[in-house]
Image (spheres, rainbow, N blue to C red):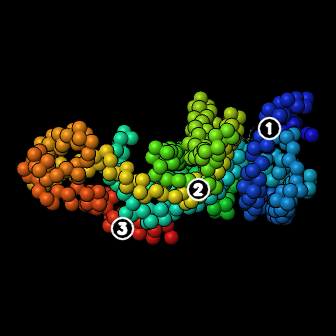
Amino acid sequence: MAKLWGGRFSKATDTQVDDFNSSIRFDARMYAQDIAGSCAHAKMLGKQGIIPQEDADLIVKTLKEILADIEENKVEFSIDAEDIHMNIETILISRIGDVGKRLHTGRSRNDQVALDIRMYLRHEIDSLLEEVKALRKTILAIAKEHLATIMPGYTHLQKAQPITLAHHVMAYYEMLRRDGERLTDCRKRLNIMPLGSGALAGTTYPLDREFVAAELGFDGVTQNSLDGVSDRDFVCELAFCLSLIMTHLSRFSEEIILWSSHEFSFIELDDAYSTGSSIMPQKKNPDVAELVRGKTGRVYGSLTGLLTMLKGLPLAYNKDMQEDKEQIFDAIDTVKMCLPVFTNMLATMQVRKDKMLHGAKGGFTNATDVADYLVKHGLPFRDAHGVVGRMVAYCIEKDTVIDALSMEEMQSFSPLIQEDIYDAISLTTCVNERKLIGGPAMETMKAVISRYEKEED
Ligand code: ARG
């Protein structure tokens, strides 16, 4: 097939080069954006008198027919036409001949692809925001149910202080809330219209760029044509947003994996969200969480690939930039696959409250509260720390816990200790007295949850 750019060539492209060069097998997914962009461009060309109005009308009408045909699977793209932009233009010309040849006036594929990718990513960000929100809502529901479910909180994966499951899962809510904000922010920065940048230096035609921007729902137009065609910051930025979402899902997955182990037994995953072993009949494996954790590396790979692809490129457009698409598409597809399955895995898991409580009772998770008790009775904190340290050593020796010591044993460590110590260091007190902003106390978490519930509506 003759190339749209074939004029100065005396030989056909080698088929190997056609294969190598063409991007249609992965950029075909931008067909709707490409057509919308071309319709807006054609309309503007007509309005500005750059092409006859009736030609603009016919182009728009035919592009819409092509869109419908693509959606009904009636169109076959060809690698000869290289990419989605030239495939659609070729089909247009095959349908309306010379009129179709006027569409590309004042436009280059360089600004065309910059436009399409922005519109495509914008559309994907909107659906990602929905998926992240669905996960946040599931977390809110779990938190609401487990305001009083006491569990051990950890540092260094060593038991530290008692918290609640609500408090624990709401930490992930905070991360995912920031993820939503980051995606929204990224969308703002990418929603600037590059058409009119031409190949690199703009064009002499009196294009109405603002009109095209308004037609296509952009917030403004790019201010430098070199940057307009060579900027892929927004692709990297989105890849970073996606990488951080995966970091959060991966950390959560790691906890799900630990919690579902026999050693922890804090949760039991639903049968529908776990898998078995081909040899060991007893096994129930947390494959979903493991795969989410595993796929995180793949999304980081896209971010690294994108940054590396860009770092040595001179201005303006270079063909290297065609490599942006597979990377960002794969990252988007991966995150869009992980989010809903992760959400459903969480929504269906069973929580073993008894095991969580049991876990919180061991490991001296109330030791800080014993020290705080002494401080409230006048001892400086460093001295209190020392006293409780000795109590813990004594308990380890006797294989017991601080709460189980008799009053006599307690007072042998400090005469400040009175009967009210038992209540002061109970796990429920430890949790519910931490009612400052950000703490695990039931009343604090309740307020946070109801505030976020309103925000999600
Ligand atoms: N398929 C190309 C890409 O994805 C479109 C732009 C090509 N421009 C060019 N002058 N070869 O980047």
- Secondary structure under tag 1 reads loop
Badge 2 is on which residue? Answer: 270
Give the residue type that dot 2 points to. Answer: Asp
Q: Residues within 10 Å of mark 2 (few under 14, many from 20)?
A: some
Give the residue type that dot 1 points to. Answer: Ser
Give the residue type that dot 3 points to. Answer: Ala
Instruction: Work out whether mark 2 precedes mark 3 in sequence or the reverse, and give the earlier one.
Output: 2
Badge 1 is on which residue? Answer: 22
Instruction: Work out whether mark 3 precedes mark 1 in sequence or the reverse, and give the earlier one.
Output: 1
Residue 103 in view here: yes
Distance CA(mark 1)–CA(mark 2): 45 Å
Distance CA(mark 2)–CA(mark 3): 30 Å
424 or 196, nearer to the observer: 424
Camera-nearest label, 1 or 2: 2
Q: In the rendering, at what x and y percent does residue 207 appear?
A: 69, 55
The numbered dot on residue 304 is none
Badge 3 is on which residue? Answer: 447
Q: In the rendering, at what x and y percent does residue 5 appear?
A: 84, 39
- Secondary structure under tag 2 reads loop
Image quarter (top left, top right, bottom left or bottom right) of the N terminus: top right
